[in-house]
Amino acid sequence: MTRIDDLPIRDELRGKTPYGAPQLDVPVRLNTNENPHPAPEALVRRIAERVADAARHLNRYPDRDARQLRAELAAYLTRTTGHPLTAERLWAANGSNEVLQQLLQAFGGPGRGAIGFDPSYSMHSLIARGTGTSWVSGPRTEDFGIDQDAAVAAIHAHRPAVVFVCSPNNPTGTAVSAGTVLALHDAAQAAARDERGALVVVDEAYAEFSHRPSLLPLIEGRPRLVITRTMSKAFGAAGLRLGYLAADAAVVDAVQLVRLPYHLSAVTQATALAALEFADTLLTYVEELKDERDRLVTELTAIGCEVTESDANFVQFGRFEDAAAVWRRLLDHGVLVRDNGVPGRLRVTTGTRAENDAFLDAVRAVTKEIS
Ligand code: PMP
């Protein structure tokens, strides 16, 4: 039997396993930070209408520049952040993962490095590897915030071409202050090997769930600062695969140099436009989820867990001697959470009220079992 390593695969991919959480068929699945609410029926009907319309033109390639979609995304961000944006400053792709990949294809690559602050979203380093960008794992504080002084020092030591800041951060849930982002941004420019500076990518996949305002206004007057967003979480549309960025128009021009032509299908564009029409309804679900997230923090703390303050739609909790064993016991109780490899901690996604109750009951039971 031929194995991957028998093939002439790139050295950096040898012996590696693909990214992905287990997709197990259990009653309560709270492991991938999905939104538990399916699309409302009125939105399902609107998607069907718009997709039917797109289907009539599927003999043609889609709008390569997704102009209408980018204009609607700009309008959504303008409305929800108060920061005025237009389509030229927006770019969309198949999930924010693809946006991040395009950014690294354009601004990273062989001979260039990127830095992130771990524990954080592990796809940042994996996409770096896939694009031939070297990776440095920067420090965090004990309570999972970014240690600003240590982070600035790491940037000066490594002089990366790309800096990743995830806020709210996955898997810890912690948000980063505007002041820290600015300090990292300024350090990255001062330290850059390239006289034209370095790119700072603020991954705001979970921004809509935060107690704090978006960091988006920071892009003003800072052409090397990029905000990435997704419709996978707040819009409850993980299956759609639609992510986007907001930045200076020059960054949008740059990613167009590496994007595949017609990368966003007509069906994707039609579905995303339908979802954007329902943004206000979908954001009322986000408000409910924020309340449920806060309830999880309160209840887990009452159970005696050590809980990390969360600005996202998930909560990191512990501290367990053997987090992997607790993960397995929760699964035995029919609840799937995520073990991100953070020592002593697990991560639970906010589900429906009933799912969260089932999760909390399981934690109570497991806590008794192991005490
Ligand atoms: N950024 C962060 C921080 C995430 O947690 C995720 C999804 N788990 C993504 C980006 C990618 O999401 P998507 O590709 O679905 O937009």
Image (cartoon, rainbow, N blue to C red):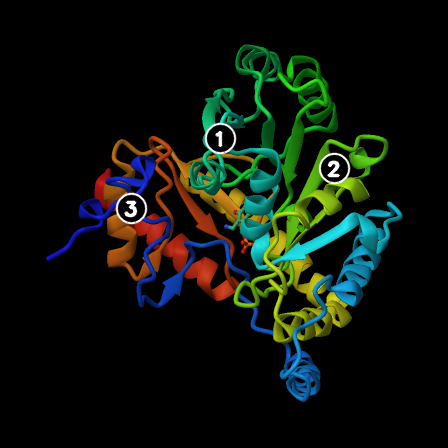
Q: Is mark 2 within 8 Å of ligand 1?
A: no
Say which of 19 and 210 sits in front: 19
Q: Nearer the viewer, mark 1 or mark 3?
A: 1
Nearer the N terminus, badge 1 or badge 2?
1
**The N terminus lies in quadrant:** bottom left
Which residue lies under the disc numbered 2? Answer: 215
The span from disc 1 to disc 2 (Cα, nearest Å) is 30 Å
Q: Amino acid at mark 3?
A: Thr
Q: Position of residue 156 (x, y in %)?
A: 59, 11
Q: Position of residue 266 (x, y in %)?
A: 65, 74
Q: Amino acid at mark 2?
A: Leu
Q: Position of residue 167 (x, y in %)?
A: 62, 37
314 sits left or right of 175 in the view = left
Residue contact at pointers 1 and 3, CB within 8 angstroms: no
Residue contact at pointers 1 and 2, CB within 8 angstroms: no
- Secondary element at image label 1: loop
Vertical side of 249 occupied by 237: above or below: below
Q: Amino acid at mark 1?
A: Pro
Label disc, if present, on residue 17 of the rendered structure = 3
Which residue lies under the disc numbered 1? Answer: 110
Q: Nearer the viewer, mark 3 or mark 2?
A: 3
- Secondary element at image label 3: loop
Q: Residue at x 67, y 89 (%)?
A: 56
Say which of 111 and 45 sits in front: 111
Q: Residue at x 47, y 65 (%)?
A: 354
